[in-house]
Image: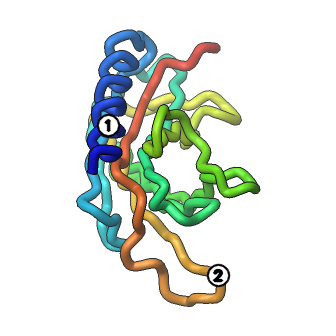
Amino acid sequence: MLRTIKALFFGIISCFFVVSCDSNAVFDTYKSVPKEWHKDSIASFNFKAPDTLKNYNLYVNLRNTDAYKFSNLFLIVELDYPNGKVVTDTLEYKMAAPNGELLGTGFSDLKENKLWFRGYKEPFKFNEEGEYIVNIQHAMRKNGDVNGVEFLKGITDIGFRVEKAQKE
């Protein structure tokens, strides 16, 4: 219990410093996961297009503990445009090193992962003015199982981040 409280304290303090000192962030929000992430639970993030002429990087942010027992993570990420267009991707992220050590940043068993969504291969522009919606759902399966993992343990928070690209 004390370990969890320490992890939560350091996580909150770290986020405060990162958010207060980060001038590139345009949108950066997290939603907490209640105990376990159900396979049908979708984290939704609504935001307005910041500027249709500039380039941006889009990230899925996750916080996880050592209760996360997989080396990777599969997500279904849906980007809904203001005009009704919907783009859905199934993405895989590496979450642990070959020796089993969890990747990400953090001082304790709570790790934070900033995972690329858009902008890493080519610049991403919000080509429409208005409100965008991002929906994030896990799509994890155990090897050999047809059905997905119903309750995913170890993910504590799901976030989405839009930041100004360094290169225009």
Q: Name the residue under label 2.
A: 143
| Label 1 to label 2: alpha-carbon separation | 34 Å
Q: The C terminus appears in which quarter of the rendering?
A: top right
Q: In this view, does 21 lie to the left or right of 53?
A: left
Which residue is pictured at 27% across the width and 51% down the height? Answer: 1
Q: Which residue lies furthest to the front in this view?
A: 2
Instruction: Single out the mark in the foreground, 1 or 2.
Output: 1
User: Is residue 75 in view?
Assistant: yes
Q: Where does residue 8 sit, x and y in percent of width and height?
A: 30, 38
At mark 2, the secondary structure is loop
Q: Quadrant of residue 30?
A: top left
The numbered mark at residue 6 is 1
Q: Name the spot of residue 80 as percent of width and height, x first.
A: 37, 50
Vertical position of residue 139 compared to residue 15: above or below: below
Please name the residue shown 49% across and 38% down the image: 59
Q: Do the residues labelled 1 and 2 touch (CB within 8 Å)?
A: no
